[in-house]
């Protein structure tokens, strides 16, 4: 006698295919199913839902901020909360804002977790929307329905509200964001788990996983565990990589295989040449359009500030002359673009007879070679200002890795002897300031670590250059002009 069928319960066994495969999913030598791992992986998949929630919340709070900003402006400027000025402005500006903000990823998880980047992206989208609104009002000759006071106050209040709401959102979800917003399944097959494996790390054998495409159950099991993940990463022995590569291509998520042997090459990406896989090791100089943007930016800022700096240069020159005998300027050979040398300009801060043309001796905190005026110049970084002439001539940029003298050392070792990656920093022009400087890595290189920290920042700058990053570094430099390591 047949009984009515009841819905099958979703159990760890059915999830892992144990109802199809007699071999159990085990942990170590235990004969029990690893329920804890399954629960942990299932919880990890919730990170996708968190990302969706954060993005939706970001869109909602930004739109609410714009509504609040313009209607508050209407109340402050016109004394009326409900009027056509604010209504018309938000009706046009919000769709424009969403178009620009979605285009520059202002609402993705990275922008929500990185408060400064998120605010900058949202603010940029709002300003673009405001600019378009102004153009629409101008070309349509809208006068009576467009209050300039409400407009400018509305933009200002909206920006302030966006900053407040995004700061609150980041604070509320800080713990969840810091735990990670991406679900990554890391499968270790025949190799030990790394110390920083993360919550998504599992052992293939303990979970009954194997890259055998002849086993329908094995393929099903891998697909079931990968469901809901953002990425699957395989750590395995070299001889198993080909099999795992075939198995991973059956999944509907992004997959990777870790190849530690490639670490020593420091590859930027993988390419293909003549039917063979190749490693991209160097992207060379910036793309021609980026070079033009960077050069135009350098010239615009340098030529605009030079007339303002010239009278100040004269005063500094007089002070140097009154303090000690010798020239006002000091020129020294430094390493520039493409590892080619150039002559750098500086205000002389040392006694003429004690100047070090090759830079063999790093400046120390109580260096007896520095003059009284020179100590002030170095403490305030004023001695570096003449390098604006190098920027105008094209040898340097406003932002980039700081150029070093040929004889620069740390712990009595030349920089390139400490780390041969040192030469890689010169694929862009050296700069008046850089990422390393705003992070506080400046002054004498007394230990090898001093060079390593700067080099890491320089290579990071080279790899992630953008005009916006140059602008941020220039603004941040103003905050670190006076620094404990400036001497």
Image: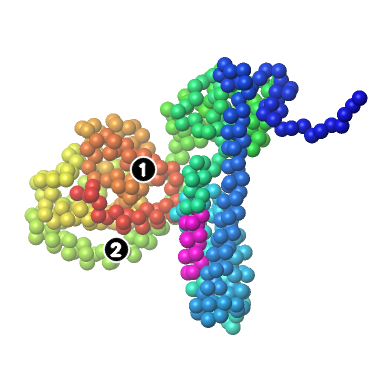
Q: Residues within 10 Å of mark 1 (few under 14, many from 20)?
A: many
* Whether label 2 touches label 1, CB < 8 Å: no
Q: In this view of the protein, which residue sits in the foreground, 300 or 214?
A: 214
Image quadrant of residue 12? Answer: top right
Judge whether residue 162 can be spotted in this image: yes
Q: Residue at x 19, y 49 (%)?
A: 487
Query: How are the residues colored?
Result: rainbow
Report x, y in % for residue 235: 53, 25
The residue sitting at the right extreme is: 1
In the picture, residue 321 is in which quadrant? Answer: bottom left
Chief secondary structure of the magenta span? helix
Question: Which is nearer the N-term, disc 2 or disc 1?
Answer: 2
Q: Magenta part of the protein: which range?
A: 155-170
Residue 446 sits above or below residue 296 on the image: above
User: Badge 2: how crowded within 10 Å, few (<14), some, or many (20+)?
Assistant: some
The residue where tag 1 is placed is 458
Q: Secondary structure at mark 1?
A: helix
Horizontal and vertical percent position of residue 290: 46, 51
Q: Which residue is mark 2?
A: 306
Residue 313 covered by magenta stretch = no
Give the CA distance from mark 2 to mark 1: 27 Å
**Residue depicted at 62% across the width and 64% down the height:** 95
Q: Identify the element where label 2 is drawn.
A: helix
Quadrant for the N terminus, please.
top right
Which percent across, then down, holds residue 471? Answer: 40, 56
Which residue corresponds to the image point at 11% horizontal and 46% vertical from the top-left?
A: 369
- Above-or-below relation of 319 to 451: below
How far from the left and from the top, in percent, is residue 220? 70, 27
Choose between 109 and 468: the one closer to the eye: 109
């Amino acid at each position: 006698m047949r009984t009515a069928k009841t819905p099958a319960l979703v159990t760890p066994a059915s999830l892992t295919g144990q109802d199809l495969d007699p071999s159990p999913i085990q942990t170590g030598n235990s004969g029990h199913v690893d329920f804890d791992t399954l629960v942990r992986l299932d919880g990890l998949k919730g990170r996708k839902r968190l990302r969706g929630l954060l993005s939706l919340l970001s869109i909602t709070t930004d739109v609410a901020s714009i509504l609040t900003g313009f209607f508050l402006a209407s109340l402050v400027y016109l004394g009326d909360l409900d009027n056509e000025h604010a209504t018309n402005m938000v009706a046009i500006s919000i769709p424009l804002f969403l178009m620009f903000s979605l285009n520059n990823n202002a609402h993705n998880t990275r922008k929500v977790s990185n408060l400064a980047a998120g605010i900058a992206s949202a603010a940029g989208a709002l300003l673009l929307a405001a600019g378009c609104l102004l153009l629409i009002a101008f070309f349509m000759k809208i006068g009576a329905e467009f209050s300039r006071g409400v407009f400018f106050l509305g933009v200002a209040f909206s920006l302030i509200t966006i900053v407040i709401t995004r700061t609150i959102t980041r604070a509320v979800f800080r713990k969840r964001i810091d735990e990670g917003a991406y679900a990554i399944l890391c499968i270790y097959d025949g190799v030990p788990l790394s110390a920083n494996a993360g919550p998504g790390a599992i052992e293939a054998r303990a979970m009954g996983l194997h890259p055998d495409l002849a086993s329908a159950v094995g393929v099903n099991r891998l697909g079931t565990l990968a469901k809901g993940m953002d990425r699957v990463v395989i750590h395995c022995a070299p001889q198993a990589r080909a099999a795992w590569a075939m198995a991973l291509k059956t999944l509907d998520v992004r997959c990777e295989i870790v190849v530690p042997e490639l670490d020593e090459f420091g590859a930027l990406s993988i390419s293909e040449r003549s039917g063979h896989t190749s490693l991209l090791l160097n992207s060379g100089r910036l793309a021609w359009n980026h070079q033009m943007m960077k050069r135009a930016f350098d010239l615009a800022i340098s030529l605009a500030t030079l007339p303002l700096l010239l009278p100040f240069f004269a005063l500094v020159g007089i002070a140097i002359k009154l303090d000690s005998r010798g020239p006002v300027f000091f020129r020294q050979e430094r390493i520039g673009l493409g590892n080619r040398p150039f002559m750098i300009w500086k205000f002389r801060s040392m006694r003429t007879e004690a100047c070090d043309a090759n830079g063999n001796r790093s400046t120390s905190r109580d260096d007896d070679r520095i003059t009284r005026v020179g100590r002030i110049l170095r403490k305030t970084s004023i001695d570096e200002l003449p390098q604006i002439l190098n920027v105008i001539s094209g040898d340097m940029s406003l932002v980039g890795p700081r150029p070093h003298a040929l004889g620069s050392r740390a712990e009595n070792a030349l920089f390139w002897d400490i780390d041969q990656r040192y030469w890689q920093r010169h694929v862009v022009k050296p700069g008046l300031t850089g990422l390393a400087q705003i992070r506080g890595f400046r002054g004498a290189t007394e230990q090898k670590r001093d060079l390593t920290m700067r080099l890491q920042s320089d290579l990071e700058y080279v790899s992630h250059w953008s005009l916006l990053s140059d602008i941020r570094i220039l603004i941040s430099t103003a905050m670190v002009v006076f620094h404990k390591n400036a001497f």
